[in-house]
Image (cartoon, rainbow, N blue to C red):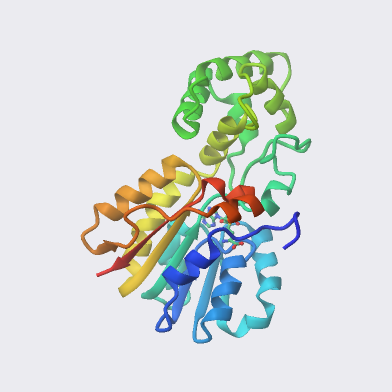
Amino acid sequence: MNDQGHIAVLSNEVFENLISTGCRTFVDATVGAAGHALGMLVRNRNLHLIGIDRDQEALDRAGQTLKEYSGRVTLLRGNFRNLKEILQGIGISSIDGILFDLGISSYQLADSRGFSFNDDEGLDMRMDTREALTAYEIVNSYRQEDIARILYEYGEEHRSRKIAKVIFDSRKKEKIRTARQLASIVASAKKRTGRIHPATKTFQALRIAVNDELGSLAQGMDAAVGLLAAGGRIGIITFHSLEDRMVKERFRNDRTLNVLTRKAIKPGREEVLSNPRSRSAKLRVAEKN
Ligand SMILES: C[S@@+](CC[C@H](N)C(=O)[O-])C[C@H]1O[C@@H](n2cnc3c(N)ncnc32)[C@H](O)[C@@H]1O
């Protein structure tokens, strides 16, 4: 895929661990740009793939990418936290496998929704534009201590209080309207270390809060495990430690699951070099007893 596009991470590892020849009904709970989905459909000719995404633009793109396989694909818009109801809607109560590839795609980063530091468009960050809460609202109307809490809890940002204060002081002068403005306000409160932008954790935290990503993940995992047939597999790719910890604990504490990855699978050097976005990816896989 070209460099504007989204490159699916840990693809071979996903294919090897999640789709056996016996796998028939597979859910891609975050179909996105459909890189994983396409690979699975090519590799298993008996597979019916149900692709879910909360972002309509992502679904439209997935529809294009998977056009050739449309007879074996069902694309549905929704939040995977409602997986059970979404599948009930098409008469499915049992699945052979499921993948969650969390976070946002490179297309969304480039989409002028305020996900990216140098974005001059509105500070939005909603994956589903039907939802009400935006990053603009959090940044411009939440109390200083609530902003600090969000940055600390969801971004593991140690400068959370200082950053919340500069946000608060600056919005008193004028509303913070763009991602670029916010990134530069945060940069005034925190030094850059290495190549990582000082606002990285702040942006991660706001995105998680706007989209209730951790709440969705907890409910999505529960629903997925409930739907898996015996021998069916669940695979989850995470991009930061908060999510990875949740997945690890959820798998470990469930007696109906057999954890197949004692240690998370990480991308090799070559993948990280060719796709830097993959550097923090971790895949965990479990099988239903
Ligand atoms: C990293 S991308 C997935 C990329 C995909 N695996 C591929 O190969 O192109 C994550 C996608 O999940 C979607 N997403 C994130 N949270 C979601 C949720 N709670 N419910 C449904 N879709 C979600 C995002 O909109 C985004 O399109």
Pinpoint residue 172: horizontal percent, then vertical percent: 67, 14
Answer yes or no: is residue 28 visible: no
Q: Residue drawn 78% across and 35% down?
A: 120
Q: Residue drawn 73% across and 48% down?
A: 110
Instruction: Tell me which corner region of the image, top left, top right, bottom left or bottom right, holds residue 84.
Output: bottom left
Pinpoint residue 161: horizontal percent, then vertical percent: 51, 17
Ligand 1 picture quarter: bottom right
Pinpoint residue 152: horizontal percent, then vertical percent: 46, 27
Relative to residue 28, is residue 93 drawn left or right?
A: left
Residue placed furthest toward the left: 255
Residue placed furthest toward the right: 120
- Depth check, front residue: 208 or 174: 208
- Depth check, front residue: 277 or 232: 277
Pinpoint residue 183: horizontal percent, then vertical percent: 68, 28
Instruction: Tell me which corner region of the image, top left, top right, bottom left or bottom right, holds residue 59.
Output: bottom right
Count of numbered circles on the image: 0
Relative to residue 31, is residue 178 drawn left or right?
A: right
Is the residue 249 above or below the residue 47 in the image?
above
Answer yes or no: is residue 117 visible: yes
Placement of the N terminus among the 4 image quadrants: bottom right
Q: Residue drawn 75% across and 37% down?
A: 119
Is the residue 182 above or below the residue 284 in the image?
above
Is the residue 214 above or below the residue 176 in the image?
below
Placement of the C terminus among the 4 image quadrants: bottom left
